[in-house]
Amino acid sequence: MPVPPPAARPPAVRTATLNPMQATAYTYDTETRSGQVLLDDGTPVPFDAAAFDRGGLRLLRPGQRVRIETERSGEGLRITLVTLQTL
């Protein structure tokens, strides 16, 4: 079956996930497995246990560089994954 021309194709579905970013661990509570990171501009952004667990970490110390994945932006920015930054 021939592939339809680009104009006839349905629009691509855009996901809400933004590109991975780097941040610095700011706070972490071992009981709730949640905390905050600081973006490079100094903005604190909270993360929940689901984002922490998705990254496969066991512990997070303030000052560690982390990689985060997010959805939404601005005031609605939500972290969906926290993991250690590796090269």
Image (spheres, rainbow, N blue to C red):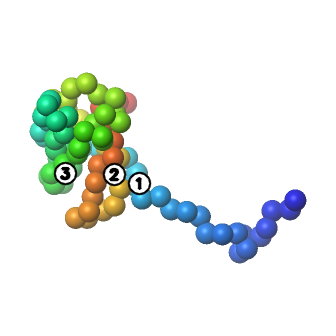
Q: Position of residue 58 (x, y in %)?
A: 25, 24
- Which quadrant holds the C terminus? top left
- Contact between marks 2 and 1 (CB within 8 A): the answer is yes
Residue at the far right in the pictured view: 1
Q: How many marks?
A: 3
Q: Which residue is mark 1?
A: 17
Q: Amino acid at mark 2?
A: Thr
Residue in the foreground of this view, choosing between 10 and 85: 10
Q: Determine which residue is flagged by label 2.
A: 70
* Tag 3 residue: 45
| The N terminus sits in image quarter | bottom right
Hey, what amino acid is under mark 3?
Val
Q: Residue furthest front?
A: 31
**Do the numbered discs 3 and 2 sit on residues whose CB atoms are within 8 Å?**
yes
Among the 4 quarters of the image, the one containing residue 48: top left
Dot 3 falls on a residue whose secondary structure is: strand
Residue at 59% in and 64% down: 12
Question: Image quadrant of residue 60?
Answer: top left
Question: How much space separates mark 3 and mark 2, taking CA atoms?
Answer: 10 Å
Label 2: which secondary element: strand
Q: CA distance from mark 2 to mark 1?
A: 6 Å
Would you call the spot at circle 1 few (<14 residues within 10 Å), some (14-19), or many (20 or more)? some
Q: Is residue 80 left or right of residue 13?
A: left
Residue 72 sits in quarter: bottom left
- Classed neighbour count for the residue bearing mark 3: other residues with Cα under 10 Å, few (<14), some (14–19), many (≥20): some
Type of the residue with mark 1: Thr
